[in-house]
Each structure stands twice: as structure tokens, then as C-alpha cells.
Image (tube, grey):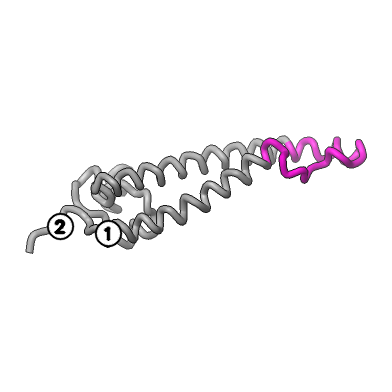
């Protein structure tokens, strides 16, 4: 029996559904982080006494920095998921870019935007 070089249409559809769910959640999380940074959620000390404002300013700056970093990571994650959808459309999804072999389904279910098999990933270190 020859080794398969790509996933079937049914398998690609399964992965597409997983990715679309993760993408939807990732976009919602990104919007929440963006709102935290721009204070659109109205959950800060703007309307409280000046004493609380002074005490909270340091924490607010730190929180904005952290939220900014998280938002950047989330945006990168969204881009990886979108790239995975393109690979599904091109029928190249699930193929390790180092070895050319199929990435195991278990790995793709856990990390649907993976482009490397576990072996190839470990060899990078």
C-alpha cells in the first residue's frame, strides 16, 4: 500500500470545520482585547474619585501593555488559521513543509494551523 500524500475531501472538510470554529472564537477574543486597550468596554476608573484613579493608573498601563501583547498574538493566530484555510482550498493542508509527509490527524486536531510534523518541529530545536 502506498503512502498517502494528502487528506481526502471529507477529512479536509472536518479540519475546515475545526478551523472555522477556532477562527470565530479567536476573532471574538481579539475584539475583546482590542476593546480593553481602547477602553471601549467602559470598565475602568474614569468615573471614580481621583484617589482611585492615581492608584489604578499604573495597573491600567500594565494591563493595556499586556492586552496589547495578547492582541498581537491573537492576530497572529488568526492569520495562521486563515492561512490553514487557504491550504485546505489548495489541497496542501496537513502536509509537513519539511518532510512532505502527512501530519498526523491528532496533531492537526490539537494544532489545526500546524505546518510541521512533530519530528520536523523537534528537529528545529
Q: Position of residue 108 (x, y in %)?
A: 34, 56
Q: Indicate the secondary structure of the residue bearing disc 2.
A: loop
What is the secondary structure assignment of the residue under circle 1?
Answer: loop
Quick one: label 1 or label 2, which is nearer the N terminus?
A: 2
Residue placed at 23% from the left, 57% from the top? Answer: 7
Q: Residues within 10 Å of mark 1 (few under 14, many from 20)?
A: few
Per the rendering, the mark at residue 76 is: none
| Magenta span of residues | 36-60
Q: Is residue 42 left or right of residue 35?
A: right
Density class for disc 2 (Cα within 10 Å; few <14, some 14-19, many ≥20) is: few
Q: Residue 41 or 118: which is nearer the viewer?
A: 41
Does the magenta segment cover residue 39?
yes
Position of 21 compared to 36: left or right? left
34 on left or right of 43: left
User: At 34% from the left edge and 49% from the top edge, which residue is drawn?
Assistant: 114
Q: Position of residue 1 (x, y in %)?
A: 7, 64
Q: Is residue 66 magenta?
A: no
> Looking at the picture, how far across and down is residue 4, in whole percent?
15, 57
Query: Which image quarter holds the C terminus?
Result: top left
Alpha carbon of mark 1 to alpha carbon of mark 2: how far? Answer: 12 Å
Residue 32 vertical placement versus 17 (above, below): above
Q: Residue at x 57, y 38 (%)?
A: 69
Q: Position of residue 58 (x, y in %)?
A: 77, 36
Quadrant housing residue 111: bottom left
| Disc assigned to residue 104 | 1
Q: Which residue is mark 2?
A: 4
CB under 8 Å between discs 1 and 2: no
Amino acid at each position: 500500500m502506498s503512502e498517502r500524500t494528502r487528506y481526502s475531501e471529507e477529512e479536509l472538510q472536518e479540519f475546515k470545520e475545526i478551523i472555522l470554529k477556532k477562527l470565530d472564537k479567536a476573532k471574538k477574543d481579539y475584539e475583546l482585547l482590542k476593546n480593553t486597550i481602547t477602553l471601549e468596554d467602559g470598565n475602568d476608573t474614569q468615573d471614580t474619585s481621583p484617589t482611585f484613579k492615581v492608584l489604578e493608573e499604573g495597573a491600567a498601563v500594565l494591563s493595556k501593555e499586556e492586552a496589547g501583547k495578547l492582541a498581537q498574538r491573537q492576530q497572529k493566530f488568526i492569520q495562521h488559521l486563515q492561512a490553514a484555510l487557504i491550504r485546505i482550498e489548495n489541497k496542501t493542508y496537513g502536509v509537513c513543509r519539511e518532510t512532505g509527509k502527512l501530519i498526523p490527524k491528532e496533531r492537526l486536531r490539537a494544532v489545526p494551523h500546524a505546518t510541521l510534523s512533530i519530528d520536523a518541529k523537534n528537529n528545529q530545536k
